[in-house]
Image (cartoon, helix red, strand yellow):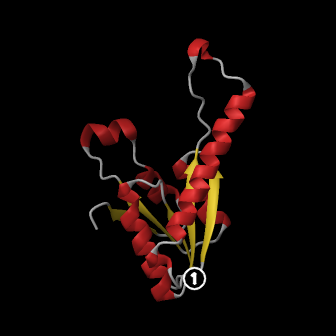
Amino acid sequence: MIIKRMLCASDFSPASRPAVRLAQELARTLKAKLILFHAYERTVPISNGGYLPPSVLREIWTATREAARRNLKRLARSPQGKGVRISLLLAEGSASAAIVRAAKNNRVDLVVMGTHGRTGVRRLLMGSVADRVIRTASCPVLVVGGRH
């Protein structure tokens, strides 16, 4: 298997940091291009009376997108990213579907992502983005536990 292009999905949580570090190290070793990826959803905060003016919603969504962009840039500037060809990609939508779509659209050879390591009832109630990506991605997926 030749890996020329990798996608590393991050939700910016502590559980995703080991996956980002490993993806950067792998990309450097394999001389592969690395796409740092984040998916965000447009949520609608509830206010008094259940209504927010569209202008306020646009400001919230713009701030969410810009914070994600800043976080991706910060990850790209980490010491592990030195000497790696890195591009940044943001997408709107549910994390698992957006990761699979981005991997396909960018013809990546490997997806790297972290896992929160939930088990039992918490996993049943919250689901697992990693599980859904593993089941639906058209390329291999490397899942990195949060303790590495």
Whether residue 92 can be seen here: no
Q: Which residue lies at the image location 35% right of the left edge and 57% below the top edge?
A: 15
- Point out the image quarter for the C terminus: bottom left
Instruction: Find residue 135 and report its horizontal and vertical position in percent.
Output: 46, 56
Whether residue 79 can be seen here: yes
Q: For residue 21, what is the image quadrant?
A: bottom left
Q: Is residue 94 above or below residue 73?
A: above
Residue furthest right in the image: 55
Q: Within 10 angstroms of label 1, few (less than 14), some, or many (20 or more) residues?
A: some
| Left or right of 7 on screen, residue 127 | left
Instruction: Find residue 115 and report its horizontal and vertical position in percent.
Output: 36, 56
Q: Which residue lies at the image location 56% right of the left edge and 45% below the top edge?
A: 94
Q: In this view, does 108 lie above or below 47?
A: below
Q: What element carries label 1?
A: loop
Amino acid type, label 1: Lys
Instruction: Find residue 24 and report its horizontal and vertical position in percent.
Output: 47, 76
Q: For residue 143, what is the image quadrant?
A: bottom left
| Left or right of 131 on screen, residue 90 | right
Residue topped by disc 1: 4
User: Which of 120/95 is in front?
Assistant: 95
Q: Which residue lies at the image location 36% right of the left edge and 66% below the top edge?
A: 18
Instruction: Find residue 9 and report its horizontal and vertical position in percent.
Output: 50, 61
Q: Is residue 18 above or below residue 14?
A: below
Q: For residue 17, what is the image quadrant?
A: bottom left
